Image (spheres, rainbow, N blue to C red):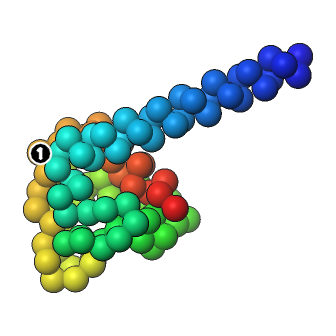
Amino acid sequence: MKAVYIAMMAAAGVVMAGQANADEALAKAKNCMSCHAIDKKLVGPAYKDVAAKYKGDAKAPAALAAKIKAGGKGAWGEIPMPPNNVTEDEAKKLAAWVLSQK
């Protein structure tokens, strides 16, 4: 039984790692990485800084997904983030991925 549990946990880890990589690939495909990086400020904030700012905020995933889709200004300075050509589902995936950065 212990071996089954260990195998299930390992499989879950592989699935989660694959999803994290897939969402990074989505960020690259949607040109998010032109203005953002995971660990340093470019034009926009580092994704790890966004995750730290909204850590523990239950409303953050929906709010960030909306901002990804519609764009925004003022939360991180005067340079606006333009609207992005993403679906609702893609915006949610990107928001979850950004908020998972450490």
Instruction: Give left or right: position of 35 versus 15.
Output: left
* Residue 44: % across, % down: 24, 70
Q: Hey, which residue is sitting farthest bottom in the picture?
A: 78
Residue type, mark 1 in image: Asn
Residue matched to label 1: 85
Which structural element holds mark 1? loop
Please determine whether, in this image, residue 33 is positioned above or below residue 19: below
Depth order, front residue of 33/82: 33
Quadrant location, the N terminus? top right
Query: How many labels, in total?
Result: 1
* Residue 80: % across, % down: 13, 72
Instruction: Give left or right: position of 44 versus 102.
Output: left
Residue 74 seen from this side: yes
Q: Hey, which residue is sitting farthest right in the picture?
A: 1
* Residue 58: % across, % down: 50, 59
Instruction: Give left or right: position of 14 versus 50.
Output: right
* Residue 47: % across, % down: 37, 63
Give the residue at x 52% y 37%: 17
Give the residue at x 52% y 62%: 102
Q: Quadrant of residue 40?
A: bottom left
Q: Residues within 10 Å of mark 1 (few under 14, many from 20)?
A: few
Give the residue at x 42% y 71%: 49
Q: Quadrant of residue 75?
A: bottom left
Residue 57 seen from this side: no
Instruction: Give left or right: position of 89 versus 43.
Output: right
Give the residue at x 37% y 35%: 22
Please determine whether, in this image, residue 54 is positioned above or below residue 94: below
Depth order, front residue of 17/96: 17
